Amino acid sequence: MYQLQDSVLLVKGIGKNLQESLGEFRIEQVLDLLLFLPLRYEDRSSIKTIKEIKNLSIDEAQIVKSEENQKVKTNFATTKAKVSKFNEYRKGRLLISRATITDEIDQINCVWFNNRFLKNKIIVGQEYFFSGNLKDGSLMQTTVEKVSDENIHTGRLVPIYSQLADLKQGNLRRILAEIISKLHQTGDLEQVFRDLHFPESIDRIVTARERLALEEILYLMQKSAENKKEHQKKAAIFNLPKNFKNKVVDFNLPFELTPAQKKAVTEIFTDLSQSSPMNRLLVGDVGSGKTIVAAIPASILVKNSQNVCLIVPTKILAKQHFDNLQNIFKDINFELINSDNKNKLDKRATFYIGTHSLLNKLKDIKPSLVIYDEQQRFGVKHRQLEKYLDKTKNQPHLLSMTATPIPRSLMLSIFSHLDLSYLDQMPNARKMATTWLVPKQKEEKALEWLVKELLSKDTKNDRKRQALIICPFINPSSYGATENVAAVKESLDRIKKELKKIYQKLEVDKKNELKIEALHSKIEKNKQAKIIEDVYAQKIQVLVSTPMVEVGVDLPNADIIIIQSAERFGLSSLHQLRGRVGRKGQESYCLLFSSNELNSGEIVKNRLQQFCQEKDGLKLAQIDLENRGAGDILGYKQSGLNDLHFASWTNVEIINQAQQKLTENPDYKSFLQKYLEKINLTSNIETATN
Ligand code: ADP
Ligand code: MG
């Protein structure tokens, strides 16, 4: 029997080596493994006769696919049959295995490539389930499983996972099935896990996912309530005089603040003149100008001989804020802190900017204000800050910033410990990118247009134009996964090829050809920084990247963004990406490409078309919610851009349920608590080493 907290080493089928490599994925306990959720499911549930399979043309399979649910692959066919013949032969280095299978009435061939293990597995005369793609009249690369009561690989909705250590899909499934069948005293959770991994129907997956979402929200609500209690006991390190008058006009900014920005600045100043520390969240869409709102009060504190810290998710972003703010606030001292620069702290009052590596220095810096620029990631991190502060002393003011579009009412119910400021206006100069959904057959033309645009210099502003091309995460559970890197490289190659054709067609001079680079997590950090630098210096005109740029890098010069496989992103994520271009107020464009396999899906097309029309981040979040059918839950987790692991900010119903539950039982402890604390902690460490 297994307990949720048991080490994975106890599980049958996991040895020391596997335990170690799972550890690299932060999978240490049985619960961690159970929460390694499928990326998607393949519908191998309906068992067809061989005759039916033969009649199933590929076209038919595709229609079923788009109508039912785009995320459940149904161009698979599963049948139950006996092996009547099996043989293998080599063609060069390729090992080809063939079997003829029969269900008494009809027969069909199965073909495998380079599967050395088959000949030990398949016994002529035995009956198996066969699941595979029908191609040219044969079943290809078929999954074979002996017929039994408890089938996990075929004859059902089969979970498909992203690559975990070097586990094969089949092994991972076996391990999970083993655990789930022997769970000890987990009450109704056993069923939840069964439904997550080996569901009987799509509905069951949805219900189970909702259960996880509920537990996560419950956890957040409780953390928040605890925070509030502790916070109310504390005093601030420093507060401005009660009669402090903030005169925004005195700041000599390069632009005029929007009314929403002014209001937020005032709210912050009011907090800073209280004796208890501020705990405020600044919510504003991408490009709404949160940085300056935080920086104005921060600069005042520095002028009052106080240290302040701005903590951002990436080094790139830290450098960017450092450069920009230094330019605006010329009369105060700034310092950029990285994990690798061992710079001594300044004697003067300083505005420190850095990644999470700043956290380790808080005890020395003793800032009176800490600003967290967390983009999408926020909420639970506040608590972690405490570890880095001297709890016996007075506390710094705390300001977090986020672009997550969460309606105020939801914020109030979940994050009861936070005060809120909303930037619900865009700076005047800023126009959201004009967005088009590009049909497949026009993609080439679109690239040609891109080339022409980029080659035409912006004479008004005397600058080159720039573009971003985004490839989706293939493996959304990890920024660094090799599949993602491969996707970027492949995309770069393809685009380069296409560009070559276009240069020939347009007779572009060799020396004028666009400089194009790829950016992904497997590139050495220094080289990453160099690429970004070159982008800023306009030496690179086209940047091909994973949604890494999404984490808030301001590329003020970029005019155009192309998002490949756009259907894989939630609208909120697309919106964040689109916010990366046109940041100087220049005319900007967002082109959505969709991938081949889903080109026909009407639902997908409609959703993306809606996105082209709608420019409001909050409304898009709402549309995401309305479209959140089984598809979104089963599908690619929306590119990992959201700090919630199971829930969605927009799922009002679950949030209400959580509230209800806490009212009934204020001491309810989410079973996810330890898990969430652990992954939130490790994700911090990850960013700290960025
Ligand atoms: P975000 O809210 O996404 O963090 P930023 O703070 O990075 O947005 O601001 C986006 C861009 O808009 C920056 O280049 C910033 O200088 C500019 N900006 C901010 N406020 C204004 C304003 N009131 N008028 C014009 N430009 C502004
Ligand atoms: Mg920002």
Image (cartoon, helix red, strand yellow):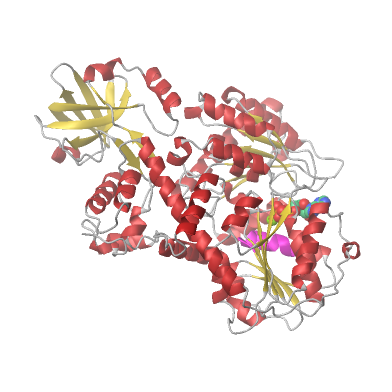
Residue 238 colored magenta? no
In front here: 356 or 536?
Answer: 356
**Residue visible at 82% across and 40% down in the picture:** 458
Residue at the location (29% across, 49% down)?
172
Task: Determine whether, in the image, residue 249 is placed left or right of residue 393.
Answer: right
Query: Measuring 65% from the left and 59% from the top, which residue is drawn there?
Result: 316
Point out residue 191 in the picture as x, y percentages from the top left corner. Answer: 30, 48
- Numbered range of the magenta stretch: 312-325
Q: Is residue 340 visible?
A: no
Residue 55, picture quadrant: top left
Q: Residue lying furthest front in this view?
A: 664
| Observer-nearest of 124 and 423 | 423
Which part of the image, by quadrant, shows the N terminus? Answer: bottom left
The spot of residue 640 in percent (x, y) is 51, 49
Magenta-span inclusion, residue 318: yes
Q: Can the viewer see residue 67?
A: yes
* Position in image of residue 557 (x %, y %): 75, 47
From the image, give the main secondary structure of the stretch colored magenta: helix
